[in-house]
Image: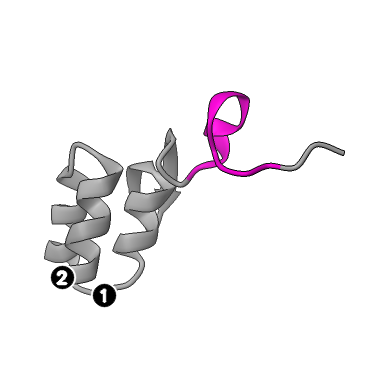
């Protein structure tokens, strides 16, 4: 069995930072990370700010601060 030591190469798609549409409570987020950070708040304005982030890392930073 091959051990996965990170989400690189052929395993990159397993990362929360992989771009894939995620439908959550009526909105479509560009990655799991975006949706995860948005799920931390009930404030629709905060969710929309997270949705607008161009990169998952930006959504993560915004979710931590918010």
Percent position of residue 60, x then y? 27, 56
Percent position of residue 54, x then y? 19, 37
Start-end of magenta stretch: 4-15
Magenta-colored stretch includes residue 17: no
Identify the residue position indicated by label 1 in the image: 42
> Can residue 26 be seen at all in this image of the molecule?
no
Label 2 or label 1, whichever lies nearer to me, is 2
In the image, what residue occupies the spot 39% across and 60% down?
36
Vertical comparison of 51 with 62: above or below: above
> Can residue 44 be seen at all in this image of the molecule?
yes
| Label 2 packing within 10 angstroms: few (<14), some (14-19), many (20+) | few
Identify the residue position indicated by label 2 in the image: 65
* Viewer-nearest residue: 28 or 55: 55
Q: Is residue 57 left or right of residue 1?
A: left
Measured Cα–Cα span from mark 2 to mark 1: 15 Å
Vertical comparison of 19 with 29: above or below: above
Say if mark 2 contacts mark 1, CB within 8 Å.
no
Residue that protrudes farthest toward the right in the picture: 1
SS for dot 2? helix
In the image, what residue occupies the spot 87% across and 39% down?
1
In the image, what residue occupies the spot 20% across and 48% down?
58
* Viewer-nearest residue: 4 or 49: 4
Vertical comparison of 55 with 62: above or below: above
* Viewer-nearest residue: 22 or 59: 59
């Amino acid at each position: 069995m091959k051990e996965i030591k990170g989400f690189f190469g052929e395993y990159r798609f397993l990362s929360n930072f992989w771009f894939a549409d995620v439908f959550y409570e009526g909105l479509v987020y560009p990655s799991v990370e975006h949706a995860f950070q948005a799920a931390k708040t009930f404030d629709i304005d905060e969710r929309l700010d997270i949705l607008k982030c161009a990169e998952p890392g930006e959504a993560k930073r915004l979710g931590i601060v918010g």
